[in-house]
Image: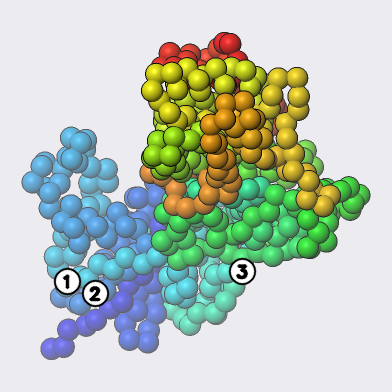
Amino acid sequence: MSIRAYEIYTDGACSGNPGPGGWAAVIMEGDQATEISGYEEKTTNQRMELKAAVEALRFIPSGSKVRLSSDSAYLINCFNQKWIDRWQRNGWLTGKGQPVENQDLWLELMELAHKNTVEWIKVKGHSSDRINQRCDHLARAEIISANKEEADENKKLKTRGFKDEAGISEKPHPESGCKINNGTLEKQETVFPRIGLLTGGGDCPGLNAVIRAVVKGATYNYNYEVVGFNSGFRGLVENDAGLIDDFAVSGILNRGGTILGTSNRDNPFNFRPSGESDYRETENDRSGDAIDNLKKWGINCLIVIGGDGSLLLAHRFSELGVPVIGIPKTIDNDLPATDVTFGFDSAVTTATEAIDKIHTTAESHHRIMVVEVMGRHSGWIALQAGMAGGGDIILIPEIPFEFEYIVDKIMERNSRGKKFSIIVVAEGAYPAGEEPLYQAKGQVKRLGGISSVIAREIEKRTEMESRATVLGHLQRGGSPTSYDRVLATRFGVKAVELFRDKKYNEMVCLRGHNIESVPLEKAVAGTKRVDPSSEQVRAAIAVGTCFGHPL
């Protein structure tokens, strides 16, 4: 007697945890396809994943050979990695000593699996496999039939799925709680919530880590879809976008930059044709086109990853009725509503490493080395990189400096046999009584060049050789630090949770050790600057650092 072979796909879905849930399985024997599905009124996603596997294995005769595919890593690992055997030995307790949930289904699943030869296969959520998509659709259709109110709301959203020629029955089978369909598969519209995602403003390490966290957090846990808009708000206006799945974000955690691209000059409310790089007013409001494109994609909420400028634009869209969630990104660390922004630690690390290298050449040649770092209106990078790199003088926008005190510090070090000095200066720092230094390039004015002014003035006053080094965009590039990778991941996951809870017009933030959220309106109010009387500044002064001013 020949052994019968089956290919099984299972899936479960839940609207809330706990909440109405649906499960489904597509059972293939040769070219015959059988579908089973059902629902529970108050359940969890894990229970629905297990229920689907149990009902599928119940359906086939004992002694069969089965390939069971599921997008639940938890279900598959429990068998492939022998977790379920360990639970049995431990009296059905987890490694943390807590009772294993859904023990009744695990026991039944074990019994059914032992009656057959089962190969457990992990498939990716929202894969391109038609049968896997069909199974997902069936599970969600059960929730819709059990929760009409949710169905009416979700009908506004459309994406890809499948159905059989006979259609899907509205009611579950009256005896078994299942419905069974046999037939071929064809395309249909179905209902998945969608998140829009863009990165705006200057790039920084950690952007890809956030994109990855949003996509994986959305698809693995909630079966949401993510649409990425390219080149920041320009992509939103020009509808340059596409679906992002977990394949697209594979391997990008450690990469700098952003796979979506970004722009710090594209304002939908004051839009310029492509290629124009100045900041002149155009009176070309394309915000309506941006909103139309969100509707075309069926997007429920737009997640904007950016600094103060990008989040201000996000806030303006929220005032027009667009559900928005912000994620704070800036190497300057100047957003007041979060303790730290991702990208900052990576920029400080890059600047510190540069100062370490400059230290050796400064000491070898007995030079004064002036290192210019980024920081337009706040001196966080200069302060922390200066402290970490052993800077002798730190100059920041919050404390206008006087050359007299800089020279005094250099000469005092010289008198103690220290023939070199390291000066770390933020690009926005300026002498007392003057203004920040801008470099004009066409119609665009950019901060920068203060390090060269300081080096020349020191040479003139001390006759000691001085050199200026501008780190510039080195601070924006490269791989993110482990701290920024973790923070970016936590921010991305929190943003998806805010979407799940329908908590819109918020920005995720770090408060102490916790990831929280604040209203966007508060997030974009003002700039976080270094307090000259802060503990960090006092600590720097205590080890002999000069700030170019008698603090």
**Mark 2, secondary structure of its residue:** strand
Q: Could you tell me how many numbered marks the image carries?
A: 3
Residue type at the position of mark 1: Asn
Tag 1 secondary structure:
loop
Identify which residue is drawn at 58% across, 49% down.
473
Give the residue type at disc 2. Answer: Val
The residue depicted at 59 percent of the width and 17 percent of the height is 405
Residue 148 position, x and y percent, is 60, 51
Foreground disc of the pair 1, 3: 3
Residue 254 place in picture, x, y as percent: 42, 54
Which residue: 79% across, 63% down? 274
Q: Is residue 240 visible?
A: yes
> What is the secondary structure assignment of the residue under circle 3?
strand
Q: Is residue 448 above or below residue 295?
A: above
The three-letter code of the residue at mark 3 reads: Glu
Q: Cα distance, mark 3 to mark 2?
A: 30 Å
Q: In the image, 155: left or right of 268? A: left
Residue of label 1: 116
Label 3 Cα crowd, 10 Å radius (few <14 / some 14-19 / many 20+):
some
State the residue lying farthest toward the right: 283
Q: Residue 40: x percent and y percent?
A: 42, 50
The residue that label 3 is drawn on is: 189
Of residues 128 and 142, the one drawn nearer to the viewer in this rendering: 128
Furthest-front residue in this view? 463
Q: Quadrant of the N terminus?
A: bottom left
Q: Nearer the viewer, residue 78 or 99?
A: 78
Given residues 501 and 406, the one toward you in this image is 406
Residue under numbered circle 2: 66
What is the C-alpha distance between the residues marked 2 and 1? 7 Å
Disc 2 and disc 1 in contact, CB within 8 angstroms:
yes
